[in-house]
Every structure is written in structure tokens, then in C-alpha cells.
Image: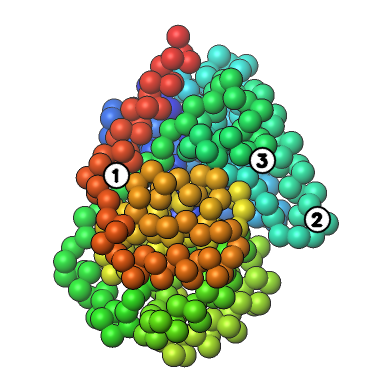
Amino acid sequence: MKILTVLTYYRPHTSGLTIYAERLARAFARRGHQVTVMTTQYDPSLPSEEALEGVRVIRVPVIARVSKGVLAPTFGLVATRLVIEHDVVHLHLPQFDAPGVAFRGRLFGRPAVLTYHCDLLLPPGMFNRFVNLVVKFQNNMAGILANHIVTYTRDYADHSSYLSRYASKLTPILPPVDLPAPAPQAVSAFARDHRVEERRPVIGMAARFAAEKGVEVLLDALPKILEKYPKAQVLFAGAYQNVMGEQAYSDRLLPRIREFAIHGHWTFLGNLDPVQMSAFYPNLDVLTVPSLNSTEAFGLVQIEAMMNGVPCVPSALPGVRQPVAMHGMGRVSEVGNAESLSQAILEVLDQPQAYRGDIETIRSLYDPESIAQEYEKLFESLRK
């Protein structure tokens, strides 16, 4: 099968959406499909075309940025050619260009499937409010034109004003999750570099430094945790400098973070590649996902942590609460409530044995090959 995957950002950009798309595209390629990823050349230094682990990546030039999005005037032209060349079109939303691509699927008889990752909620401001409205309109047009829509969980779909409109053509498919097996020497080296044994317990957070991720909730919860565990530290894995659209948020929180960092209670690790992440997780005592709104639909990092035996404390957002509900590895805290977050983290730290899960079952459920197979069944049913 010839599969065209379309999204605004692809690797090396790092987000849950891009990681999902990359894992799935590679799994399709391993299973013998011809896979093309069409995306934007958001960084001019990136090649316009290359092959990455069996996946053909085509990047369309960008002339300007608009908030967290981009303008790529030739996107439609390239999409027309690629839709004709492929058997099925797989779109990842939110994405401004999605309705145009889905329309081309209809026009040329190619089934178009949307995977809806999350809502888009930009920071306050008149211009961002306008952008939000435009993207919502585009997403709705894409939903109307698409043949089918995939969501991570029924929980998120039931609470989404967008997805509830398309219940008749909606299928939940769990996200693909995999990481390299942790190398003992790499895990030990990570522990030495970050003085893990001297500064336990270790609370992990893996995310972009962005307003919707709820970093301030963890900051507010940390003093209560330090009362009981005065040597506790937070290891933050992910982009934290020059994050698109988040400078004001960063400027507001960094002075508080520096106070914790001076005393060894907070360390920024920056973006970690998959091998480095496989050394990161085994050094944690708990991972937290204190996200604040529906821009977070699941929290893939929770499954990565659980695969390494690490319990999680997410917020009680629809979808985000599901990994803990499904696998019993952790506690759920109230959204935006620092007191609830500190209490849940302390409960997990106090009784780690109570939050052990069936790691092999978790790995099997989220194996990219299994997830790719679910998509293949859906694609084939739409091609008949």
C-alpha cells in the first residue's frame, strides 16, 4: 500500500504529535508499505527531501510563521501530486492545510483518515483568538471531508466538542509507543551525571516548556514534597529555551525555577533522543504530567515511563487520565491543583510497590507494529 502521511511539523521537531507520526510511519515502512511524509520546511536548513529509516520525507518551503503555525504557499500544489500517487491519505490534526488535502482525497478517490491528536488552544490575545477560530474552522472542514477519524481514547472523544460531532466515523486506536532497551551502563552514567542517588526521590517531567503543560502546578507542589523529601529533585526532559510562542511563559517561571535549581532541586536536561530517554526513565521514581487543558489528549510519556516500571501522576484531564486508569501504575491529580498534585506524588513515593503494573502487557498493547496493523485494517476497509 502507498501511504501518504501529512502534518505541519515532522522530525527533528519534537512533540507528542511528531513522535507519534514518526513511529507509525516507520512501522508502516517495516511492514512493507511505501510511506511518504509530507510536511513543512519550518527550518530552512532542513533538506527539502530525504529518506529516514525507510520513510520518504518531503518538506514544503515556508515563507512566514503565524503564531505556532507556518505559511507554505506551494503546499496545495505538492499535495495534489502526492495524493494522486498514493492509495490512502493519513492526516494528523490540528493542521491548517488538512481540509485542502482531504478534499483532494475525495476528488481523486483516495480515502482520507484523520488522526486527531488534541485541541489547539493558543495563549491569550486578540490575534491568537483569531488564529484559534481559523484552525477550528479548518479542522471542522477536514472532519466533514475525511472518510474516517481516529482518536486515542473514547474518554477523550466523549469530552471533545470536536470529536463528538463525528461519532459515526470515529475509531479509538491507542498510540504507538516504543523506546530502545535501556543500556545498564547508560543508566548508571545518567545517574552519576545527575547525582541521582544523592538527590532522591527523582520526579520526572518530559514535555516542551509550554503553558498548557502545567509546569507552574509542579512548581507550586514542590515545596510540600520537599517538606517530606528534602533531597527530592525534578529532572525536566524537553525543550525549554526558545520554545515557539512560549517566551512570556518562560520569562514568568524561570526566576522561580532558578531558586530550586540553585539548591539542586531542578535540572533542565533539554531535548533527549530516544537512547537518552531510555536512560532517563529508569532513574525516575515518578513521572508527572500536570497538563492543564485539552491540548493534551493522552501523554505518551506516561506509557514510556510505565514500560520502564515508573509510576505516573497525571492530571485528571479526559484522555490524560486513561493510562493510569487502564494500567493502575500511579495516581491521578486534580487539574491545576498543586495541593492535589503534591499529595498524589507523595502517595506514589511513599508506596511504590502499590503501583507496579504488567509491563509486558503494556509493551504489547502499544507496540507500533500492532498499532500499524489496526490502521491497516481501517485503511483496507475504506478502500473497498
Colour scheme in use: rainbow
**What kind of element bears circle 1?**
helix
Residue 202, compared with residue 21, is above or below; it is below
Which disc number belongs to residue 71?
none
> Which residue is pictured at 54% across the width and 26% down the height?
170
Which disc number belongs to residue 362?
1
Which quadrant: the N terminus?
A: top left
Q: Amino acid at mark 2?
A: Phe
> Which residue is pictured at 16% across the width and 70% down the height?
185
- Please state the horizontal and vertical placement of residue 204, each as a whole percent of the image: 40, 68
**What kind of element bears circle 3?**
loop
Q: Residues within 10 Å of mark 3 (few under 14, many from 20)?
A: many
> Which residue is pictured at 45% across the width and 9% down the height?
384
Q: Amino acid at mark 1?
A: Ile
Residue furthest bottom in the image:
262
Residue hosting label 3 = 96
Residue 101 in view of the camera = yes
Q: Amino acid at mark 3?
A: Phe
